[in-house]
Image (cartoon, helix red, strand yellow):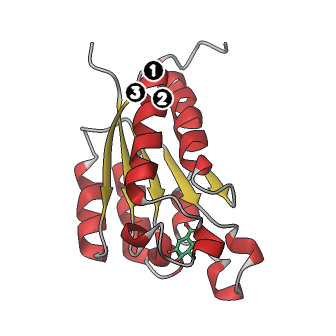
Amino acid sequence: MNPPLIAVLNGPNLNMLGTREPEKYGHATLDDVEALCAETAEGLGLAIDFRQTNGEGELITWVQECRGRAAGIVINPAGYTTTSIALLDALLAVGLPVIEVHITNIHRREEFRHHSYVSKAATGVIAGLGIRGYALALQAMAGLVEDAEDPDDDE
Ligand code: DHK
C-alpha cells in the first residue's frame, strides 16, 4: 500500500526564509524546511507533497486538488492567514484534516496577525516553535490519519 500523502503548503514570502527578517523567522531556508519535512515524514511512514506559492489563487487551487488525493494538509498560509476567506472556504470544501503552522508566535506580534480565518478549518494550530512546528504538525497528522483509517481503535 502507498503511504498516505500529506500536502505541505506554504504561502507568500516563505520562499524568502533564511534571509527574511532572520531575527523573527530564523536562518533556515525553505529548502531546509522541506528537508526536515521529508525526513520527518519518512520516519512516520507518510509521503509529502511540499510546495510554496506567492499567489492566493494558486494556493487555493492546490488545496482543491488535495481532495481525493491527499490524506491531510499542513499549511502555513503566511500573509493569507488573516485575509483570505477564499482559502478558508477551499479548506472547508476539501474536508480533510488541516494543521495550520506559523513559524513565529503570531499572538505575540502585531494585533493584525492575531486573527486567522484558516483556523476555522484547522484541526490544530502550531505557532511560535520555529520550523520545528512543521515536524510537529506532521507527527500530529500521522495520528489524525491513523484515527481516520481506524475510527474504532482508541490506541
Ligand atoms: C508567516 C508570515 O509570512 C506572516 O504573514 C504571518 C507567518 C506569520 C509565520 O510565522 O510563519 O503573520
**Along the viewing direction, whichever of 74 and 23 lies nearer the viewer:** 23
Residue tagged 1: 149
Name the mark nearer the viewer: 3 or 2.
Answer: 3
Tell me the residue at 56%/78% (across/down): 21
Q: CA distance from mark 2 to mark 1?
A: 6 Å
Residue tagged 2: 145
- The answer to whether residue 121 is above or below residue 141 is below
Q: Secondary structure at mark 1?
A: helix
Name the mark nearer the viewer: 1 or 3.
Answer: 3
Badge 3 amino acid: Leu
- Side (left or right) of 93 relative to 57: right
* Ligand 1 location (quadrant): bottom right
- The answer to whether residue 152 is above or below residue 74 is above
Q: Residues within 10 Å of mark 2 (few under 14, many from 20)?
A: some
Query: Residue 88 falls in which quadrant of the image?
Result: bottom left
Badge 2 amino acid: Val
Q: Residues within 10 Å of mark 1 (few under 14, many from 20)?
A: few
Count every numbered label the image shows and give the total. Answer: 3
- Side (left or right) of 1 relative to 105: left
The tag earlier along the polypeptide, 1 or 3, is 3
Q: CA distance from mark 3 to mark 2?
A: 10 Å
Residue tagged 3: 46
Badge 1 amino acid: Glu
Q: CA distance from mark 1 to mark 3?
A: 14 Å
* Image x and y of residue 42, in percent: 41, 25
Q: Specify the quadrant that holds the C terminus.
A: top right
Q: Are marks 3 and 2 in contact (CB under 8 Å)?
A: yes
Tell me the residue at 51%/73% (across/down): 81
Q: Are marks 1 and 3 in contact (CB under 8 Å)?
A: no
